[in-house]
Image: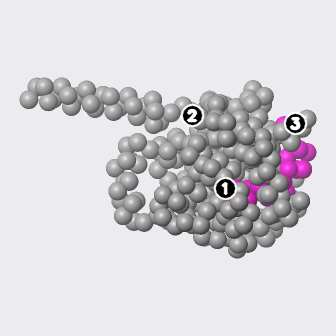
Amino acid sequence: MCTLLLYAVVFAGAAYIFRQIFVKGKRCKSQLNLTGKTVIVTGSNTGIGKTTAIDLAKRGARVILACRNEQRGLSALEEVKKATGSSQVVFMQLNLGSMKSVRSFAETFLKNESRLDILINNAGVYMQGRTSDGLGLMFGVNHIGHFLLTHLLLDRLKQCGPSRIVNVSSLGHNFGNIDFDCLTTHNALGLGTSFKEVFQYYCDSKLCNVLFTHELAKKLQGTQVTCYSLHPGAINTELARNTSSLLQLALTPLTVFFFKNPVQGSQTTLHCALQQGIEYLSGRYFSNCTVRDVYPKAKDDVAAKRLWELSEKLTGLA
């Protein structure tokens, strides 16, 4: 009995240490005040997007909640205002699965807002389907929508420099591969619908985020705009809300103990957006508030340029 109790204590202690070190992770240490600055956070009606917006609003920033669903966006607006006491929080509708919506959002923003200091491309989906433009849904939302948005707002970011672009990617990019033949033929990362295939396409879209950041940094050289991609951690959010209820139920014990909560998961985003002295790391990938090396495929100059050129063509920017 004593031996079993000892084992239980040791296991509990090890589990606690694991959670403290590897699950909770580091916190953003920046104390930067953002009064007079303007930030856009896409997908900020829930999860790490919302907690990121709350932190930035507490620092005095004017925060634009860029969300697809108006009802959920307005609800988040009230939550953020209540949590921060800030009146400088605004909801603007943005559907990243529609290039028309992205262009409309950018036009309205540039007309009504004089500044843009930080653009946080946070929104993402995990499901198959098609955008209104006929693109694969994860490719269209997770990459193309943000690619177009960034381009349309880039001049304003340059005018307000030093400014930053933060692209929320995932550790999953390590498992990603970009099938350019499929993209060229079908405007999608893949056509399958099995669990394995959908997971693969999600990872592919996250690789797009890292390659986009890699190429963008090159094109921003000589400006006062820097950019970063990141893995926020395994987070207990609503990203998997479109998966089967059985899968969500099966994952519950894992997400409760081994996944970060949204506040913990927002720390690396905040680090990339706020930490002073990392400007020389523009284009790099971060995890747990620390710059990380990536596999060669995630910094492949040829693939990054090819993705950029294809993205320009699909968005009509070329």
Residue drawn at 81 percent across, 68 percent down: 104
Say what secondary structure mark 3 lies in: loop
Magenta stretch contains residue 247: no
Of the two numbered discs 2 and 3 on the same chain, state the one appearing first in sequence: 3
**Disc 3 to disc 1: CB gap under 8 Å:** no
Q: Quadrant of the N terminus?
A: top left
Of the two numbered discs 2 and 1 on the same chain, state the one appearing first in sequence: 1
**Residue 160 quadrant:** top right
Residue drawn at 64 percent across, 65 percent down: 137
Colour style of the rendered protein structure? one colour
C-alpha separation, residue under disc 3 versus residue under disc 1: 29 Å
C-alpha separation, residue under disc 2 versus residue under disc 3: 26 Å
Q: Mark 2 points at which residue?
A: 288
Magenta stretch contains residue 154: yes
Name the foreground residue: 275 vs 279: 279
Q: How crowded is mark 2: few (under 14 residues within 10 Å), some or many (20 or more)?
A: many
**Residue 188 quadrant:** bottom right
Residue 254 % position (x, y): 37, 47
Tell me the magenta residue range. 139-163
On residue 179, which mark appears?
A: 1
Q: Name the residue under label 3.
A: 221
**Disc 2 to disc 1: CB gap under 8 Å:** no
Residue 47 % position (x, y): 55, 53
* Eye-nearest disc, 3 or 1: 1
In the image, residue 77 sits, relative to residue 272, either above or below, namely below
In the image, residue 11 sits, relative to residue 315, either above or below, namely above
On residue 239, which mark appears?
A: none
Q: How crowded is mark 3: few (under 14 residues within 10 Å), some or many (20 or more)?
A: few
Name the foreground residue: 213 vs 7: 213
Left or right relative to 224: residue 282 = left
Q: As shown in the figure, which amino acid type bears the numbered disc 1? A: Asp
Residue 165 % position (x, y): 76, 44
